[in-house]
Image (spheres, grey):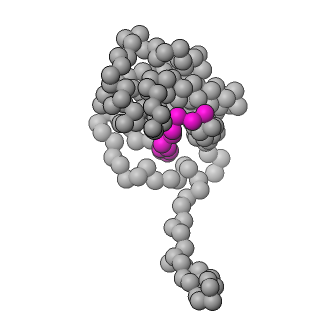
């Protein structure tokens, strides 16, 4: 363990150095989770909590872009995935009722598997409880906002523990390492 000593108000202060993480996502740990039978564990997974704020959609797009870039998708495919992710966020937030006290929030999970990318956006527990008073249309259309299905390979709309979610799936061929 390495330490850094810095002067602070005339006294020495000692801080532990942060734990180093692998920067190459191909060698990143999967969190020690084991796959259930019939399921695969993602090589990399990014989880983020987003409030219903248009400025945060840029962050959701950045997560999607990073995941697509690491998978080796073309520039066009990356742009389509970013657009679909932003549209999916808007679709999920359209389900939340307007609440002046606290904005709706959603969990965005970007997972990179050996053959595909999955981006899941799920309305948070508090927002879903408020949402439970509204019925979700059976056709999967949520209000006037809906993801363009042509941007990705699959769009799944489902209820998870009583919370609406949208899952985007983009398949790709793994890029072989030159090393």
Residue 15 on the magenta segment: no
Instruction: Pinpoint residue 170: horizontal percent, then vertical percent.
Output: 54, 27
Judge by depth and name the residue closer to the eye, 99 or 114: 99
What residue sits 35% from the left and 49% below the top? 33
Main secondary structure of the magenta stretch = strand
Where does residue 58 sit, x and y in percent of width and height? Answer: 63, 37
> Is 148 drawn above or below residue 102 in the view shown?
above
Which of these two is toward me, 67 or 56?
A: 56
Look at 63% across and 89% down and name the residue there.
10
Magenta residue check for 45: yes
Residue found at the very far front of the displayed protein: 100
Q: Residue at x 40, y 41 (%)?
A: 41
How many discs appear? Answer: 0
Q: Which residue shows up at 30% across the image and 31% down it?
A: 161
Residue 86 or 128: which is nearer the viewer? 128
Q: Which residues are magenta?
A: 43-54
Figure check: 106 above or below 147: below
Q: Is residue 34 visible?
A: yes
78 in relation to 17, above or below: above
Residue 68 visible in the displayed image: no
Report which quarter residue 124 is drawn in: top left
Residue 140 place in picture, x, y as percent: 43, 14
Point out residue 99 in the picture as x, y percentages from the top left corner: 45, 31
Q: Is residue 38 left or right of residue 50?
A: left
Which residue is situated farthest in the top direction here?
139
């Amino acid at each position: 363990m390495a330490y850094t000593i810095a002067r602070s108000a005339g006294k020495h202060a000692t801080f532990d150095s942060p734990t180093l993480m692998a920067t190459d996502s191909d060698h990143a740990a999967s969190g020690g989770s084991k796959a259930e039978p019939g399921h695969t564990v993602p090589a990399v997974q990014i989880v983020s909590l987003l409030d219903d704020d248009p400025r945060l959609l840029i962050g959701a797009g950045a997560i999607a872009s990073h995941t697509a870039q690491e998978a080796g998708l073309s520039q066009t495919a990356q742009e389509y995935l970013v657009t679909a992710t932003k549209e999916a966020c808007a679709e999920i937030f359209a389900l939340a009722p307007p609440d002046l006290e606290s904005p709706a929030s959603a969990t965005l999970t970007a997972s990179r598997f050996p053959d595909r990318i999955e981006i899941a956006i799920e309305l948070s527990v508090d927002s879903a409880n408020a949402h439970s008073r509204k019925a979700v249309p059976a056709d999967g259309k949520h209000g006037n906002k809906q993801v363009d299905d042509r941007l990705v390979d699959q769009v799944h709309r489902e209820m998870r523990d009583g919370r609406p979610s949208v899952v985007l799936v983009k398949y790709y061929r793994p890029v072989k390492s030159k090393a």
